Amino acid sequence: MTECWRLDDARQTLALASTGGLCPQVIYWGAPLPMNEDLTALTQVSTLDVTGGMLDQNPDLSLCPEASRSFPGQPGLIVRDQDGTPLLPKFHLDHVNQTDLGLTVTCKDEANRLTYVAAFELDPETHVIAMTAALTADRPLHLHWLAAPVLPAPQHAEDMIDFAGRWCGEFQMNRTAWSPGIRYRENRTGRTGHEHFPGLIIPCLRATNTTGEAFAFHYGWSGGHRMIAEELPDGRRQIQFGHAARMETAPATEFRTAPLYAVYSSDGLNGCAVSFQRHLRDRIVTWTDRGRPRPVHYNCWEAVYFAHDLPVLKDIATRAAALGAERFVLDDGWFGQRDDDTSSLSDWEVDPRKYPDGLGPLIDYVHAQDMSFGIWFEPEMINPNSNIHRAHPDWALGAEDQILGRQQKALNMALPEVRAFLYDRISALLSAYPIDYIKWDHNRVLPLPDADQTRGSYALIDRLRADFPHVEIESCASGGGRIDFGILRRTQRVWLSDSNDALERLKMQHNASLFLPAAVTGSHVGPRSCHTSGRVLDIEFRGWVAAQRHMGFEMDPRELTAHEADVLGEITTWWKQNRDWMETADILRLDASDPSLIAEQQQSRDGSRFVLFAGRADTSSQIAPRPLRLTRLEHDARYEISLRNRASATQLSRGKLALKDGPVTLTGAALMHNGITLPWSFPQSMWVLEGRKL
Ligand code: DGJ
């Protein structure tokens, strides 16, 4: 007998079936099926044939594939009994609870006394399906691996895209061809990491940013994940995500995965991206004050590093405010004896040498410039050269002889006394001063992966958020080393990268928009000569790249020429005039036919306006620019488009282009199918095209 269930929204159907009382499998996920579809018949016709050299029946690719049922690939659960004996779970369906948009599947293994629960929740507006798996037992077990509910991957796909990165080079896309066997990513660093963003996209044949079918996944956990994308010998493909293996360091009676967020799109990678952007912004992030526009930041790190000097900081604050900054963030260097990065982490008390009267005079001054005040912490970290380490060496995580990272160790966040200490120090500062923002850093990998560490960090942040609900937090880890929906449940911004090089940033933030909306993605105007690349970039390019996301400045404003300050002031004013709608806009990656162009269209939710940022990363191989096709416009509607920075056309752009003279009106059809031809431009420059539906 076959039992079936389905979840539907306007975009998709997810159908599950259990035959013979076994653990159910996803038999279909994709474009909506008619409501009268016979799912039993669909299950039957989808059954794979059997030929020579095969078992007499193909084992199900269930929500938790079981080794005990001859499953020919990686199992969804690897667990040992109390005494270390490997268990071979064999589940039977117990019951399914169904609501309009949710399914909870409970399976039991009577012999091993295990219960497995897979839960699905479909959001009909964002079209994201959030799914978790849980395992319970009547005695403590040792967990090696538990996958979130396992999904089949399409066979009409040639490639998969996942993400790698490094310090100052986050969100690099890797395309790998499907082939028999496993594409396996496992992050054992104990934090989300630059190296292994927990995401995967499967573009079906011929899919691009704007067209075709695609499936995408994100595992919302900050402690390191494992991803298995496996093609079985029979051709079927499975996707597994979970915590990195062996992260549960103690036996327990209950284990739970983080949510796996999955999206199906019938309109290219952008369909997945927009779903994730909206879901993150509208469902995951807990905003402190939804009505408050995102303030323009000033962060002093690349201006002063550890050399905090009150008169200098005041001078910088005056200039930052004049440029349009609305929040001043005091970075590393204000506490302990922190004159470089070799000491003082954990000594979270204001340095009286630098601030003899505490932070009050600086904060008062910043407030007088109409800016709010934010401050840097790196709570999970401790320098061996710190008073706290001398007093509590046992608070550090890992062995005595571990390799340090940036001269520091991590604190053991599983220890309640460590969390209590951190809470006391941070809350003392938040209570003593009017601070509305924390930049929360995490600059080294852990000496070992341990899920308790991540849970400890989450608990500390949750407690602080509950007691200081007006304080926003930015997740930073040497730039983008801790970006995921788990940390973003408790924070409101990410520091995407330590690279303030606008050219690098242009690429990174474009790729990151596959998951992140502009509202959470910090982007700062860096120094003229970039500190992490040595590149010298024009202020207009630097300004527009920052204006693509949550804008801020991080250079020393004393270096700006009058011209640079004017340009930056103008771009910042533009950003402020547009941030209301841009904050909730969809970021749509365009399919530029010129590979040197990185172009995106940010479109308001109601489709009434858009801004197109066309970043020229490099010189083109072709002499004249190719047309750039827009996307998701109304076919018959007329749009007035206008090149915002047309005055920036160089003398080498000699042609008579209408866009250089003023606004032009075209239909959506023309803009999407013909595209627009932008003026010739220098590399490392940006055209900004504004569009309004008439
Ligand atoms: C790493 C961060 O990513 C930087 O922005 C800065 O805050 C430094 N840490 C401070 O030590």
Image (spheres, rainbow, N blue to C red):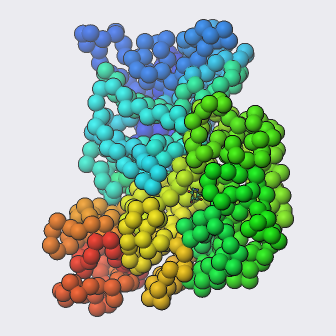
Q: Depth check: 246 or 54 in front?
A: 246
Quarter of the rendered image showing ligand 1: bottom right
The answer to whether one can see residue 363 in this image is: yes
189 in relation to 287, above or below: above
Q: Residue at x 84, y 58 (%)?
A: 428
When the figure is inspected, residue 626 is found, relative to residue 36, above or below; the finding is below
| Left or right placement of residue 656 versus residue 160 in this view | left
Which residue is at 35% across, 53% downward? 268
- Provide residue 512's location: percent of width, then percent of height: 45, 55
Q: Is residue 361 above or below residue 126?
A: below
Q: Quadrant of residue 678?
A: bottom left
Q: Position of residue 433 (x, y in %)?
A: 81, 67
Q: On the rendered image, what quadrant is the C terminus found in?
A: bottom left
Q: Is residue 694 left or right of residue 364?
A: left
Q: Position of residue 232 (x, y in %)?
A: 34, 23
Front-most of 264 and 548?
A: 548
Q: In this orientation, does residue 600 appear? A: no
The answer to whether residue 421 is left or right of residue 496 is right
* Residue at 28% over, 91% down: 661
**Residue placed most toward the observer, 634 or 211:** 211
Quarter assignment of residue 41: top left
Please report the residue visible at 62 percent of the width from the left and 30 percent of the height from the top. Answer: 401
- Count the labels in the image: 0
Residue 10: percent from the left, percent from the top?
47, 51
Q: Residue furthest left?
A: 623
